[in-house]
Image: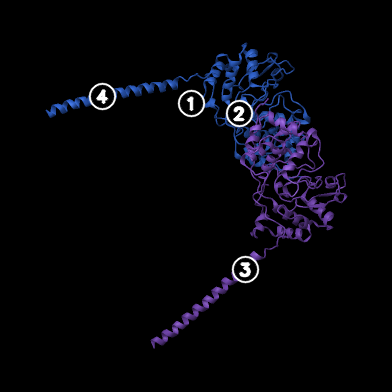
Chain colours: A blue, B purple
Amino acid sequence: MYPALINFSRIKTVSLLVLGCVFLSFTLFTSCQQDEEDIARPPVTPHPLFEVLPAEAEDPEYNIRTPERIDLGHKLFFEPKLSRSGVISCNTCHVVGAAGVDHRAQAIGEGARVGPRNSPTVFNAAFLKAQFWDGRAATLEEQAKGPIQAHVEMDLTPEEAMERLRRTGYEPYFAAAFPEYDEPFTFDNLAKALAAFQRTLVTPGSRFDHYLEGNHDILTEDELAGMLLFQENGCASCHHGPLLGGNMFSEFSHIAGDDIGREAVTGYEGDRFVFRVAPLRNVEKTFPYFHDGSAETLEDAVSIMGSAQLGRTFNDDEVYLIVSFLKTLTGEFPMVPHPALPRTRVD
Amino acid sequence: MYPALINFSRIKTVSLLVLGCVFLSFTLFTSCQQDEEDIARPPVTPHPLFEVLPAEAEDPEYNIRTPERIDLGHKLFFEPKLSRSGVISCNTCHVVGAAGVDHRAQAIGEGARVGPRNSPTVFNAAFLKAQFWDGRAATLEEQAKGPIQAHVEMDLTPEEAMERLRRTGYEPYFAAAFPEYDEPFTFDNLAKALAAFQRTLVTPGSRFDHYLEGNHDILTEDELAGMLLFQENGCASCHHGPLLGGNMFSEFSHIAGDDIGREAVTGYEGDRFVFRVAPLRNVEKTFPYFHDGSAETLEDAVSIMGSAQLGRTFNDDEVYLIVSFLKTLTGEFPMVPHPALPRTRVD
């Protein structure tokens, strides 16, 4: 009796166990499938040319960063003696505490002269494929030499700049930053040091980057809808890569004016009104927009871009959604100390 | 026999012990006396009115610092929108990375206008008994309102300044910094926030301070000789207190010119060419010197002060020694980050 009962009981127990296992396996399998779907299919599939912003910029082999070189560049970036009046430094137009820009339509420089174009942000400039709105410098090293000499910006010759730096005690800092050079104290090395410092000015960690990395809950429905609009309407055809821009050139003839853009660099008529596509990282914070700063708000910029570049008329809702998406491109800005400037009298 | 021997032996042992103790006590007493002499008599007895620079400035009861208030003042100190051109901030003339000065003879301000006087350092200004070269403001709170409005400095009315701040998104920062106010967004509170930030800009820990605190080995023979000359020739009669200056007024008529000094403040003819005695903390780094910046080097300044104020002709050795002493007044400068500036468009 007992054995039979026990046997029966055992069979029941085993059956229940088996059933339980099957159910559990099914549940796990199902949820596992859902997880795989989540990973494989985000709410909006990002444009294939979008890239996560690297947390670190790479150095070119001719300018490997050292703490001394970065420190020198940091000092030079804040050095007002690099302008004729002694009031304007790189940081005057590329304010590290204000998204790397001056928030003016067009830059103001020496003698209160107004430059022809809007100051681009210094943040993430390390990742640009070409520097300046017309791409006339290929590297940060080349770029750094421009504003110091430009009449409307800092207005010094290389010789004047170096003599000023010598007289205020910069030579030992150049020696420490460029120990492998027989003559470290040169304008070329000034540019290298500035570039080395600027390669530290990157803003990773935006919500957009987290989304690209697989955190699909981080963007709101509006932001995702904006991303979809951004992609489906063709914005992403030019605004892609790690900066969503800054890696190609495009004609932008919406703005009437004397600024012929890249033609002035190449001498090629086909480059008339061609400009570097604006990078969109931290774009929420870098107003006003366009090479002449003529668009005051991001809404205006999106709307004009739609009609001028894509032949589309975005309605207010669409503009709102695209702007919502663009605001997810704001990253984490590094804390930049005010450097200690050399102030030793050297005769 | 044995007991006698033993007794004798014991007596000898006790005698030796007593002698040893006496010798040891004498030795200890002597060295102890030397220590006391060291403490009581440093190589040079500091002037009785010299004071160690406090590591912390005290707040007036009407402006108690909070992190929010300091943060707002920090932003305002670096805010170029507080000048008409939008290029000049407090930090343009009082550079936190350059001993708190601009190293010009006379300050440069809006429209490249040159002010009549040399920019005083912002470091340790919290300890000044009166602000400006002519002492026309009693407090940092009063002082802060001056340069913003001065035609040769930042050239804005209070209304213009506040409207600019409102439009770039400062109102929430004022609300956080002044939560006890019904109307926190005022020019008075702007000045309070600037003062709160400036009270953090102190440079304790100079070698001179360590000497005052009893570390008598920290100054070299030259520096001590300079300190003695500084005291014996009467420099310390005006240059004393925690800043070695900045706490009294004195006539200084060596400089020919239109600047009548404190008479312009008091209207009292006896105050003609009376100026606030210059504070000497970090004086090595705050060149050029005097209210018009006419002394380029510390050597020049010491030499002129000797003849003009004390009727003494210091020879080169004396000047060298006094300058050596003055260099011991250089303290430790705090690291000041570039603040994040509010850049929100408010219509």
Residue A287 x %, y % = 66, 25
What whole-number distance in Å separates the C-alpha atoms at marks 1 and 3? 72 Å
Residue B326 x %, y % = 73, 53
Compared with residue B109, is residue A256 higher up or lower down, i.e. above or below? above
What whole-number distance in Å separates the C-alpha atoms at marks 4 and 3? 93 Å
- Whether callout 2 and callout 4 share a subunit is answered yes
Q: Nearer the viewer, residue B43 or B180?
A: B180
Total marks placed = 4
Mark 4: few/some/many CA within 10 Å (<14, 14-19, 20+): few
Q: On what subunit does the disc labeled 4 rest?
A: A
- Could you tell me the amino acid type at mark 1? Asn
Mark 2: few/some/many CA within 10 Å (<14, 14-19, 20+): many
Q: Tell me the mark number nearer the camera, choosing from 2 and 3.
A: 3
Q: Which residue is mark 3?
A: B34
- Whether callout 2 and callout 3 share a subunit is answered no
Q: Nearer the viewer, residue B38 or B223?
A: B38
Verify CB contact (< 8 Å) between mark 1 and mark 3. no
The label on residue B193 is: none
Q: On what subunit does the disc labeled 2 rest?
A: A
- Could you tell me the amino acid type at mark 3? Gln
- Whether callout 1 and callout 4 share a subunit is answered yes
Q: Which residue is mark 1?
A: A215
- Whether callout 4 and callout 3 share a subunit is answered no
Q: Which residue is mark 2?
A: A124
Residue B29 x %, y % = 58, 72
Left or right: residue B268 versus residue B77 is right
Q: Tell me the mark number nearer the camera, choosing from 4 and 3.
A: 4
- Could you tell me the amino acid type at mark 2? Asn
User: Which tag, 1 or 4, sits closer to the chain's start?
Assistant: 4
